[in-house]
Amino acid sequence: MFKINTDYAMTISGDAVVTENRLPVFNPATKEVIAEVPNCTREQCESAISSARKAFASWSKADLSWRQAAVKALGQALEDRAEEFMALLTREQGKPRPGAEWEILGSAHWLKTIATQSLADEVVLDTEERRVVTRYTPVGVVGAIVPWNFPLLLAVWKIAPALVAGCTVVMKPSPYTPLCDLKFAELAADFLPPGVLNCVSGGDDLGRWITASPEVNKIAFTGSTETGRHVMRSAADTIKRLTLELGGNDPAIVLPDVDPKEIAPKLFWAAFQNNAQFCNAAKRLYIHESVYDDVRDALVNYIRTEVKVGDGSEPDTTLGPIQNSMQYEKVKEFFNDCRENGYRFACGGEIDDSAKGWFVPVTLVDNPPESSRIVQEEPFGPILPLLKWSDEGDVIERANDTIYGLAATVWGKDLDALQRIGTQIEAGTVWLNEVHQYSPEQAFGGHKQSGLGCENSLHGLAEYTNRQTITLNKIGG
Ligand code: NAD
């Protein structure tokens, strides 16, 4: 059992491992250093990988029911410690309580549910002469590399199926948000044999060592499309299996029959949940021209009356800060670009650099050109372009005119129109009149340059396996 404090260690072969050289971790709401974590050395990284390799020999052969029970127990232990993890998540990531609750209890739910999943052998043929069976065998050692926006949930989306499938794991949190992940691995050491789940903390180099290692069989990665390309190149040398969950530029299409006041809060949360530091944030809001002004004004009214940006640990905060200074600077560039090009802000627009934390005001950009940076790129912060549309074919084309294909939403009362438009969007998930509905049973993954493969569901579980076909000639031999 552990107490949450600033004494953070890596978990390698079930042991707590520290380093002389440590990395600072900040509270983004105050810019204060709240902890220091180990900066993994190359030898320690190799030791984590070889301990995972060693543990694979027995873990992969252990009874499925035993592995499932261990993952389920870990989920329960996380749920039992949820309060501590939620508080820690808010401190390191910045998200207010409801978001922290969703992520931590969600992680526990995912662990417990994925623990019920399995992939049965497929009997392809069974005659008097021949039997052909396809089995799902674990791929081996998995490198799980995660970003800073949902540090624990996106780690669990990899760890839970990997362990159930019979793989062992070396996980690497983002250097910006390693605390919950390190504590989670520490907690897991009570439920898993040594080496089955290792957690190492460090910078981007550590990620490169993991992706380049010939001892790692698969990389499960969530992060930016740019880093995803590096991961894919690095994996090529040893033909590693890959699951890539990358960036997005999700369109939201608003039909003419919406009630502007009723839809505004839903559109707000579609775009600004997790302070828009969300791969699946609605990042381009296409509003039919007949309701454009009313929807824009209802959104502005909702933001002015209902939304408070602040320290996530304060109970009345709706949106927290930007998670780190690198991202804060990146988001500022989008504000500057809009200002320099003379785009109109419907609300927000001014960043106060003297604020205590990395705070950015919720900002709506009023109908900028389709070619503008704010429409074409992923800001990953609370600045959203509102765009007008009039022709259905044209708005579908604009929605699809991107290298990304992660998700999309369509909003309106005409259910036929929702289906008609939704099925023409090139994206891994299309939500109609809802958003951010995920489930351990539902496949999630990007089309185009938003990713490769998927997470969750039996399809996601299968990504931690190789297919092995065994044929038997019953009358031969
Ligand atoms: P990032 O790509 O900068 O970093 C992600 C992780 O990769 C970090 O742990 C980082 O240390 C590591 N890393 C960096 N360079 C590496 C390299 N060359 N080799 C191996 N590992 C390396 O992403 P981020 O800024 O942490 O996260 C934001 C991005 O993630 C956004 O683009 C967002 O859309 C995307 N994202 C996607 C999903 C999804 O499911 N598709 C979910 C969340 C975030």
Image (spheres, rainbow, N blue to C red):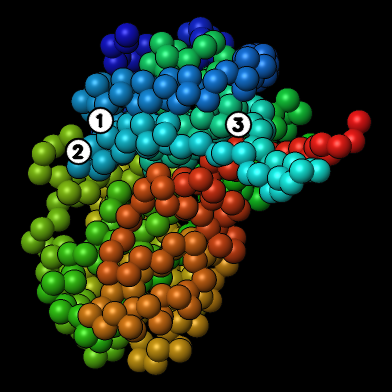
Q: Nearer the viewer, residue 18 or 415?
A: 415
Check disc 2 and report its element: helix, strand or loop. Answer: helix
Residue positioned 18% across, 34% down in the render: 313
Amino acid, disc 1: Met
Q: Which mark is residue 143?
A: 3
Q: Are marks 2 and 3 in contact (CB under 8 Å)?
A: no
Amino acid, disc 2: Arg
- Quadrant housing the C terminus: top right
Residue positioned 27% across, 34% down in the render: 105
Residue 343 location, quadrant: bottom left
Q: Nearer the viewer, residue 419 or 475?
A: 475
Image x and y of residue 357, in percent: 27, 40
In space, the residues marked 3 and 1 are separated at their CA atoms by: 25 Å
In space, the residues marked 2 and 1 are separated at their CA atoms by: 7 Å
Amino acid, disc 3: Gly
Q: Nearer the viewer, residue 190 or 472?
A: 472
Q: Is residue 477 above or below residue 63?
A: below
Q: Is residue 259 above or below residue 75?
A: below
Q: Which mark is residue 97?
A: 2
Q: Are marks 2 and 1 in contact (CB under 8 Å)?
A: yes
Check disc 3 and report its element: helix, strand or loop. Answer: strand
Q: Which mark is residue 234?
A: none
Check disc 1 and report its element: helix, strand or loop. Answer: helix
N-term mark: 2 or 3: 2
Q: Which residue is mark 1?
A: 86
N-term mark: 3 or 1: 1
In space, the residues marked 2 and 3 are separated at their CA atoms by: 30 Å
N-term mark: 2 or 1: 1
